[in-house]
Amino acid sequence: MCSGRVDLEFMLRAFSKGQDGVFIGACKLDECNYVTHGNYDALANTYLTKKILAHIGLNPERLRINFMTGADGNLLAEYTDDFTKEIKKLGPLGRSEGLDVNKVKFKLEAARKLVPYMRLLERQRLRVPVKSKEAYAQFFESKEINTLFDEIFSEKLAISQIILLLGEKPLSTSDISEILNLNPSEVSRHMKSSSRQGLVKYDETQKCYALA
């Protein structure tokens, strides 16, 4: 299977199911067996997922991609052994990061809801013009891209989490603020935006928000 089929959804789903680490083996860059350069898509998705993990508070080193040929069985063994040792050092997902397991799963689930949007964002604003390992590293590790990603993803993740919470029961602004540890003014801003999009509605009688 081409590594280009390893979607953002697959990576996030693995972590949301409790996997402590995810390893991706791909063809060597510029040696694509299908002439589609799907390994570059896998590389881009890996960079994006690492950013998502870091934003959530998880160590991005829990995700790794290595490139090799079909004849590199010795390299595959070396890479996977090294990765396994690294994950054992990090320990169970969230523990070494000092995060509550349930909160980690909640944030990962909220992030998974954003995968369609992240695919669109990658195509429109995070597409690397030159296909080379160096170009991808320079692009995705640049200050400009980190700032752009943080600004966009922070807002989208907050809204996604709020929608998940409201899917369980109606909540007031203060309730949401306390649960997500957000400033009430931030929650109000997100609610106004979500209301305009027809995602949520305000119940005047109960003085709280609910899904539209």
Image: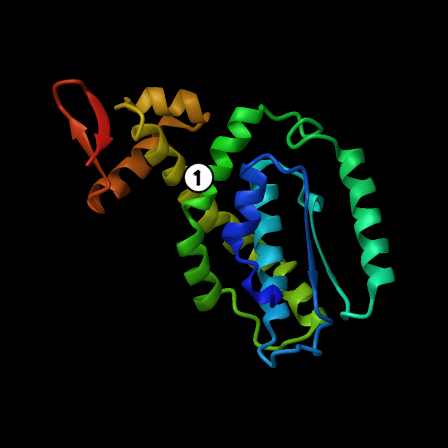
Residue located 58% across and 51% down the image? 49
Q: Position of residue 205 (x, y in %)?
A: 12, 19
Q: Quadrant of the N terminus?
A: bottom right
Q: Secondary structure at mark 1?
A: helix
Q: Position of residue 9 (x, y in %)?
A: 50, 51
* Left or right for 86, reference 3: right
* 138 over 132 or under it: above or below: above
When asked about the image quadrant of residue 56, the answer is: top right
When asked about the image quadrant of residue 141, the answer is: bottom right
* Left or right for 32, reference 7: right
Residue located 81% across and 70% down the image? 71
When asked about the image quadrant of residue 61, the answer is: top right
* Left or right for 37, reference 208: right
Q: Amino acid at mark 1?
A: Ala
Mark 1 highlights which residue?
A: 110
Q: Position of residue 10 (x, y in %)?
A: 54, 51
Q: Quadrant of the C terminus?
A: top left
